[in-house]
Image: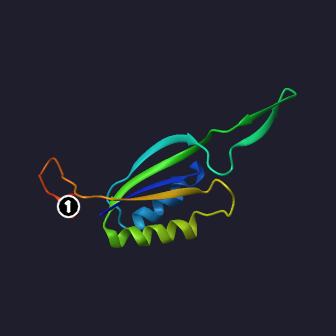
């Protein structure tokens, strides 16, 4: 099993949800986060004063899927979510040793 942590621009959330539903990801967790990567924010003028905005709003989507499914999701996200500009986001991939469904005690992929 793999845990995918996908960080994207907020306006791409619906596209990502469509991809995950199409790949049959059973559950997702969505968090609003702020941060920056290579772009280091942007400069803006307000009432004649220039200031730097370096914490940009992002959305973090987490899901745990079977290993085969994870590659399909990654390929689709890279293909469909990209705009070609800085700030498109990142995907972090983690190995998941086990999962347990608390209600039934099921383990592994059956718990997903």
The colour scheme is rainbow
Q: Residue at x 41, y 68 (%)?
A: 22
Q: Which quadrant does the C terminus fall into?
A: bottom left
The residue singled out by tag 1 in the image is 108
In the displayed orientation, state which residue is furthest to the right: 48
Q: Residue at x 59, y 51 (%)?
A: 9
Q: Is residue 9 above or below residue 25?
A: above
Q: Position of residue 46 (x, y in %)?
A: 81, 29
Corner quadrant of residue 88 = bottom right
Q: Position of residue 78 (x, y in %)?
A: 55, 67
Q: Nearer the viewer, residue 110 or 53?
A: 53
Q: Is residue 36 above or below residue 76?
A: above
In the displayed structure image, the side of residue 103 where residue 59 appears, left or right:
right
In the displayed structure image, the side of residue 74 where residue 3 appears, left or right:
left
Q: Secondary structure at mark 1?
A: helix
Q: Position of residue 79 (x, y in %)?
A: 56, 70
Q: Position of residue 90 (x, y in %)?
A: 54, 57
Q: Is residue 51 above or below residue 33?
A: above
In the displayed orientation, state which residue is furthest to the left: 105
Q: Residue at x 61, y 64 (%)?
A: 82
Q: How many numbered circles does the render carry?
A: 1
Q: Which quadrant does the N terminus fall into?
A: bottom left
Q: Residues within 10 Å of mark 1 (few under 14, many from 20)?
A: some
């Amino acid at each position: 099993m793999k845990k995918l942590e996908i960080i994207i621009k907020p306006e791409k959330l619906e596209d990502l949800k469509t991809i995950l539903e199409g790949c049959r990801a059973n559950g997702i967790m969505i968090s609003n986060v702020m941060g920056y990567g290579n772009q280091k924010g942007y400069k803006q003028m307000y009432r004649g004063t220039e200031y730097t905005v370096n914490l940009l709003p992002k959305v973090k989507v987490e899901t745990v899927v079977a290993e085969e499914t994870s590659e399909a999701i990654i390929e689709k996200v890279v293909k469909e979510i990209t705009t070609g500009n800085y700030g498109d986001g990142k995907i972090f991939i983690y190995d998941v040793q086990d999962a347990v469904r608390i209600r039934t005690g099921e383990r592994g992929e059956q718990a997903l």
